[in-house]
Image (tube, helix red, strand yellow):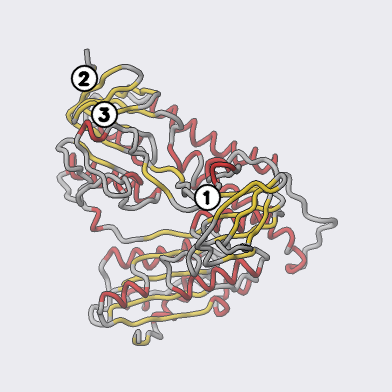
Amino acid sequence: MAKKYDAIVIGTGQAGPSLAARLTKEGMKTAIIERKLFGGTCVNVGCIPTKTLVASARAAYIARRAGDFGVVINGPVQVDMQRVKARKDAVVRQSNEGVTKWLKNMPNLTVYEGHGCFEGPGAVRVNGELLEAAKIFINVGTRAYVPDMPGIKEVPYLTNTGMMEVSVLPEHLIIVGGSYVGLEFAQMYHRFGSRVTVVEMGPRLIGREDEEISAAIKEILESEGIEVRLNARCMSAEKRGGGVAVKLSCEAAPDETVGSHLLIAMGRVPNTDDLGLDQAGVKTDARGFIVVDDELRTNVPGIWALGDVNGRGAFTHTSYNDYEIIAANLFDGDRRRVADRITAYALYIDPPLGRAGMTEAEVRASGRKALVGRMMMTRVGRARERSETQGFMKILVDAESKKILGAAILGIEGDEAIHSMLDVMYAGAPYTVIQRAVHIHPTVTELIPTVLGDLKPLE
């Protein structure tokens, strides 16, 4: 006999626990299902552990630069990878255990540890038990994409998940994929002491960004000693001694790079292939992401999809916003939509890239009249004080409405400073509001009004 619930949540990533808390608070008898790690990707193998590792790598980097600041360190700076991993594990454990304890002690919530699979529009089986509910929320996330490149099944390789278990320093780390995840690992491990080569199939790094941003990021990474190989359109892999050789072309005597470790960082695929979505009639797109409307409803009444699995955000912050949208629509009488969300994210290399709104390419494609302001970070007092002057700011403004269309800060504290523009964008206010604001000196944000005071037509 099926167990009856008012709601079922499949997956405990960023959106799931908060949604379960709201459902139970509203008096709904709720079940939540997790087949592996409570807290999902971000807590266990994504943003929290990687940014913890980034912090350790930055500490090593700053220590090596101590002399630039008049600080003397006797002897070479050494990195103990086992202690680095132990610190990361402790941070992850605290977050994972916090989510687990919260869920398992939540009133009116039943936690199932196992693989959930649909057996109908309102029925999910887990551990041999059939659960039924009028409302089901899919929050199963994504996993690393591994391409079907020749030889990949015959060589040892890592993804972002496997990298979390590495406790030794790779002699030479080859990273296939020149986008956000790959570049964060590239700089991190180079600062730990590895030789690093980034291999990218496209003509530039981070293809979704404007060309000047891609070029500046490449320059930043290469200035630290990271090797970047672009246009690797015909790759294959093979064992070579105790390591891995990645061939970069299909010529008779192909170009290749040989390393001790191989990391695949070529994007993500949704965890929808074993959910039984066909039994429920839930539609997916060509890549396997669940198709949802602007309120995150699937094509099947009573079923929603949140987080990375719906392909509408792919960030922890957008996943949480998915929860907010569903909760507001279900319980608050406050119609909220995905379309209200402004694109915003960061690349956590050092210096970081903070992005909000449209890229320059998107503004040009829209055909609207626009203004643009630019400033090199060499003009920013905070950057000069810290001897970290790489990068630049760029802000795009609609020439007629005077609203900010998009912004990028590639530079020290760019991931924080970008929010001053993001908030003005959400307010729908003209750029003159922030241009006339008096900001604190010396900060990165204080130069934003200066950039906005020198706008020029986007030609």
Query: Within the image, what quadrant is residue 30 found in?
Result: top left
Point out which mark residue 193 bears: none
User: Which quadrant: the C terminus?
Assistant: bottom left
Q: Find numbered disc 3 in the image and state the secondary structure of the residue it sits on.
A: strand
Q: Is residue 410 above or below residue 285?
A: below
Please name the residue that numbered disc 3 is placed on: 118
The earlier-in-sequence mark between 1 and 2 is 2
Residue annotated with mark 2: 4
In front here: 335 or 187? Answer: 187
113 shown above or below 185: above
Q: Nearer the viewer, residue 106 or 290?
A: 290
Horizontally, residue 95 falls left or right of residue 397, namely: right
Residue beneath label 1, please? 150
Q: Residue at x 49, y 36 (%)?
A: 95
| Left or right of 343 on screen, residue 335 | left
Front residue of 441 and 348: 348
Where is residue 103? Give x, y as percent: 38, 28
- Local packing at callout 1 (Cα closer than 10 Å; few below 14, some 14-19, many 20+) is few
At horizontal 24% and vertical 17% (from top left) the residue drawn is: 3
